[in-house]
Amino acid sequence: MSRSARPYKLVALGGTFDVLHAGHWHLLSEAFKLGDVVLIGVTSDQLVATLHKKHRVRSFSSRVRDLDRFLKTRCWSPRARVNALREPYGPAARRKKLQALIVSKGTLASGRRLNRLRRQNGLQPLDLVVVDLTKAADGKPISTTRIRNGEIDLQGRVLKNRR
């Protein structure tokens, strides 16, 4: 796709990216369709500790390594900028040239809070692009928690009940 065919020069998204799964693949794919350059904020180990996850989260370095590998398989690495998120909004709160934030329904409220912060800082609000959560075969969203619980695999296939 030519540069001019993408609606934005610079878009952002953020997440923990603990276990990369089909939901992440879809979110990233949408981001790279929309933006020439994609800022990807990966939650730092320090910030993860404040999120009260129901499961342990792999180290920042492991998560970024897997994300980098995935980006290479899609030939997106040259257009990606991966950053550690040390606070909830990271560079999205400060980057003048940022145009859009890729969110899910679950993170839309956070995107709206970010836009309020940007306005307070004299910056243009971002376009909030809502991407639907990817559903597993059972119709429920794919999530790292469900994968870790052995309910589904990375693609969202339902795993047999283990007794």
Image: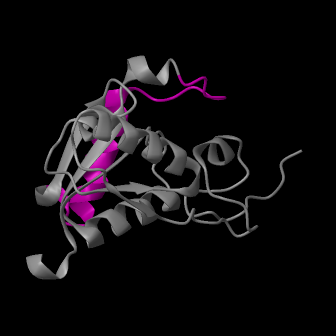
Count of numbered labels shown in the rendering: 0
User: What's the residue at 79%, 58% (across, down)?
Assistant: 160
Name the image quarter holding residue 90: top left
Q: Could you say which is closer to the camera, residue 33 or residue 20?
A: 33
In which quarter of the view is residue 153 placed?
bottom right
Residue located at (11% from left, 79% from top): 4
| In-image side of 127 versus 76 (left or right) | right
Residue at 24 percent of width and 33 percent of height: 121
Outermost right residue: 163
Residue 69 forms part of the magenta stretch: yes
Rendered-image quadrant of the C terminus: top right
Using the image as rendered, state which of residue 35 and residue 112 is in the foreground.
Answer: 112
Could you say which is closer to the camera, residue 88 or residue 68? 88
Give left or right: position of 155 versus 68: right
Q: Position of residue 38 (x, y in %)?
A: 22, 55
Asked if 151 appears above or below 58 in the picture, the reply is below
Q: Which residues are magenta?
A: 51-77
Horizontal arrangement in the rendering, residue 65 relative to residue 75 (left or right): right
Vertical order, 143 against 8 (above or below):
above
**Residue 132 placement (x, y as % from top left):** 55, 66
Q: Quadrant of the N terminus?
A: bottom left
